[in-house]
Amino acid sequence: MVVKEGNVVVVDYEGRFESGEIFDSSKHGDHSHPLEFEVSAGNVISGFDRGVLDMEKGEEKEIVIEPDDAYGNVNKSLYKEIPRESLQLDQDPEEDMGLLIATPDGKQFPTKIVEVSDKTITIDLNHPLAGKTLIFKIKIIEIKG
């Protein structure tokens, strides 16, 4: 049986950047947490979704996913300038410093400071992986209907 649209698959994966740095893996230490998703349902990035098509149970391969098929390119319109005093930081803000921003509904998401001035801070609201080429080693563990 090969993977087709609509199948639910279970995969082991390792994601890394072009530099070789691993940014995510289904194997954390001694524990394995395979990823399960419905193919072509939009639950994973499109390049990963297409990458598993036509694979067979037990098959392994490496896929290279360009930004357009991953988290997109960096969108400068998602750089937002905010008043410095609106942030309550435990330390002085610096460029490339990560921040967690809370939304009105209480959810938090990561951002990065891209510019600091005396009165304002500019943060990048793009996904942290935007603009990056991603390389995944994947192995099909199971194919369901």
Image (tube, rainbow, N blue to C red):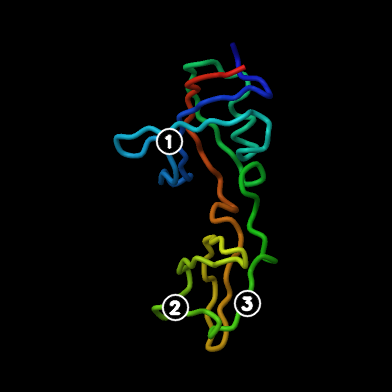
| Number of residues whose C-alpha sits closer than 10 Å to that of mark 2, classed few (under 14), some (14–19) or many (20 or more) | few
Tell me: 24 left or right of 122.
left
Which residue was labeled with disc 1?
A: 26
Give x and y (percent) for residue 91: 39, 79
- As drawn, is 78 to the left or to the right of 12? right
Residue that extends furthest to the left in the rendered view of this protein: 30
**Dot 3 alpha-carbon crowd within 10 angstroms: few under 14, some 14 to 19, many 20 or more:** some
Q: Residue, x 43% and y 36% (percent of image)?
A: 26
Quadrant assignment for the C terminus: top right
Q: Is residue 88 found left or right of 48 in the rendered image?
A: left
Image position of 104 (left or right of 117): right
- Give amino acid for label 2: Leu
SS for dot 1: loop
Q: Secondary structure at mark 3?
A: strand
The residue where tag 3 is placed is: 81
Checking the image for residue 89, the label placed there is 2
Q: Quadrant of residue 128?
A: bottom right
Horizontal and vertical percent position of residue 27: 38, 35
Percent across and percent down for residue 99 are 48, 67
Residue found at the very far bottom of the displayed protein? 118
**N-terminal label among 3 and 1:** 1
Q: Looking at numbered disc 3 in the image, what kind of residue is underneath it?
A: Glu
The residue shown at (58%, 75%) is: 122
Question: Could you tell which of marks 2 and 1 lies nearer the N-terminus?
Answer: 1
Lower position in the chain sequence, tag 3 or tag 2:
3
Q: CA distance from mark 3 to mark 2?
A: 16 Å
Up the image or down, 28 lies above or below 4; here it is: below
